[in-house]
Amino acid sequence: MQHITDEQRRIRLGRRHRLAPSARADSMVAVADSVVALHATDAATVFLSTCARLSRAGIEPVEQALYEDVSLVRLLSMRNTLFTVSRELAPYVDASNARAVAAKERRTLLKHLTEDGNGLDENWLAAAERETLAVLTARGRATGSELSAAVPALRTKITIFPGKKYETVQGVASRIIRILAAEGRIRRDRPRGSWTSSQFRWTASEPWPALTTAEAQAELALRWLRSYGPATEADIKWWTGWGLGQVRKALAAAGAEAVRLDDGTTGWVAPGDSSPEPALEPWAALLPGLDPSAMGWADRGFHLPSEHRAALFDRAGNIGPTVWWNGRIVGGWAQRADGEPVWRLLSDVGRDASTAIEAEASRLAEWVGETRITPRFRTPLERELTA
């Protein structure tokens, strides 16, 4: 069995995730495909993750891809999390994950409607959806508030968990909009505010072409291995949110090959992808919270020293902004009130690394400009740096 060392894994990460300067991409689609999917829970992360990997960083090209060309799309998918993927990959993500999310969202809302006891049912929900889509099609784009003002059904309130000590009254608008988005019948358009805002407008769209779940999972597993392999079954299970049986079927269908990792466990790579790769030039990166390179594996020990975790993660397991040197996380960064990036190194990396990190901070400050960014999930080190 071929042995792939942790150092080789770090080389792969720098090249395949387009973090080394020589590996940076010229297009947003190339960036998204290099990491399979960009975390999009925090709107700013999409821009920060993309620009860290672009040969020419800038806000406008990312907005062009998201809202004009629609070559990148947002999908509620893996682990019930919002991701941004290339339009070409979207049907596979839809069939492998998003459809199941949409079905669960619909079942949950119908259950709440039934428990509310006011006669709202599947027929009422279908009518509300039709009216919402009709209004959105006529307008072209609208915010959730604008849709609620135009569609009376969206202003309906229901009692959630009636009779329980945590009983509450909620509006249905966000739930119905969430279902329509998860099913691919509407999509997120430009936000109301700047590129850091998550208050999106919505626009009508067509559902993705139908693929079988097995076909889609095999393709997604193959692409993931090309970007993140070698990786264990546990890594793939965590990232996809699939059951272990689904993971194993997808690996078999993708033709995955077993390799040995430094800790003696078995990892998996794409077919024919076990050969060592040439070393890269030294590289530094400042990546945002929830960046896919930091969130891509269940076991991140090959690039994240365990002693750094307390400073860099919040209590829910979300990683904050990180500083990288040659495939290792060596610290964290933040943005001061005056806009200046500031960082703290948690590892001793030497003068060359410090110089490279400072250059990356300058590159980041140049394209971010006057925008002020606060991560949605704040971590101990990030808070300390902005205190």
Image (tube, rainbow, N blue to C red):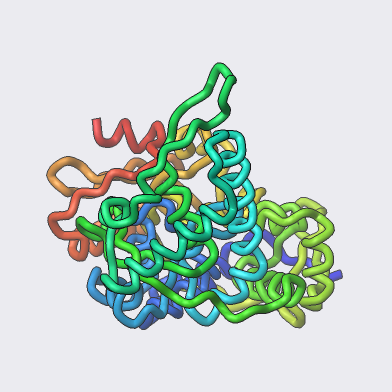
User: Does 347 sit left or right of 106 as displayed?
Assistant: left
Residue shown at 61%/40% (left/top)? 114
Q: Quadrant of residue 296?
A: bottom right
Q: Nearer the viewer, residue 88 or 321?
A: 88
Using the image, determine if residue 18 lies above or below residue 177: below
Residue 150 percent location from the top left of the image? 28, 57
Q: Give the position of the N terminus as an image quadrant.
A: bottom right
User: Does 319 sit left or right of 367 as displayed?
Assistant: right
Q: Quadrant of residue 186?
A: bottom left
Q: Is residue 363 in sight in this rendering? A: yes
Residue 159 percent location from the top left of the image? 50, 31
Q: Is residue 322 in sight in this rendering? A: no
Q: Return the residue found at the far right.
A: 1
Residue shown at 29%/53% (left/top)? 199
Residue shown at 81%/73% (left/top)? 257
Residue shown at 40%/48% (left/top)? 173
Q: Give the position of the C terminus as an image quadrant.
A: top left
Residue 325 percent location from the top left of the image? 44, 57
Please give the count of numbered marks on the rendered protein: 0
User: Does 252 sit left or right of 346 as displayed?
Assistant: right
Residue 108 percent location from the top left of the image? 61, 45
Q: Return the residue found at the far front.
A: 119
Using the image, determine if residue 240 lies above or below residue 70: above
